[in-house]
Image: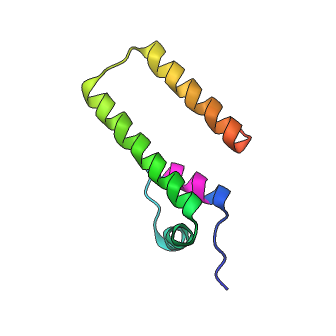
């Protein structure tokens, strides 16, 4: 029987997928989970919007180091509050 990843695992895999591409059975299971779970699809959509926004900002706006650090800290705090752990 095919065991699908949990929603928590899917969120982690989607975040990892930003930096490195998922392939093989892991990708198949991820796609299958996304087909069945609207909350994970919503998370994936929001994550992709965030990536696109950051990429657009990066092209047109070059914040100084302290602005980048604050943004990163805010994201990490949000992630810890949402998932109950440090990234």
The answer to whether residue 21 is seen in the rendering is yes
Which residue is depicted at the point 56% across and 59% down?
40
Please state the extent of the stretch shown in magenta in the rendering: 10-16
Q: List x then y, in percent, for residue 78.
A: 62, 34
Q: List x then y, in percent, for residue 34.
A: 53, 67
**In what quadrant of the picture does the C terminus appear?**
top right
Can you say whether 48 is above or below 64 in the image?
below
The answer to whether residue 86 is seen in the rendering is no
Q: Does the magenta stretch include residue 13?
A: yes
Which residue is nearer to you in this view: 42 or 84?
42
Q: List x then y, in percent, for residue 50.
A: 43, 41
Q: Is residue 8 magenta?
A: no
Q: Is residue 28 left or right of residue 4?
A: left
Q: Main secondary structure of the magenta part?
A: helix
What is the residue that sits farthest to the right in this orientation? 84
Which residue is nearer to you in this view: 23 or 60?
60
Which residue is depicted at the point 52% across and 49% down?
15
Can you say whether 69 is above or below 29 in the image?
above
Which of the 4 image quadrants contains residue 63?
top left
């Amino acid at each position: 029987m095919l065991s699908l990843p949990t929603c928590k695992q899917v969120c982690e895999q989607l975040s990892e997928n930003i930096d490195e591409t998922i392939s093989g059975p892991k990708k198949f299971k991820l796609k299958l989970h996304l087909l069945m779970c609207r909350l994970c699809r919503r998370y994936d959509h929001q994550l992709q919007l965030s990536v696109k926004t950051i990429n657009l900002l990066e092209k047109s706006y070059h914040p100084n180091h302290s602005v980048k650090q604050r943004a990163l800290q805010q994201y990490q705090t949000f992630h810890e509050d949402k998932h109950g752990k440090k990234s």
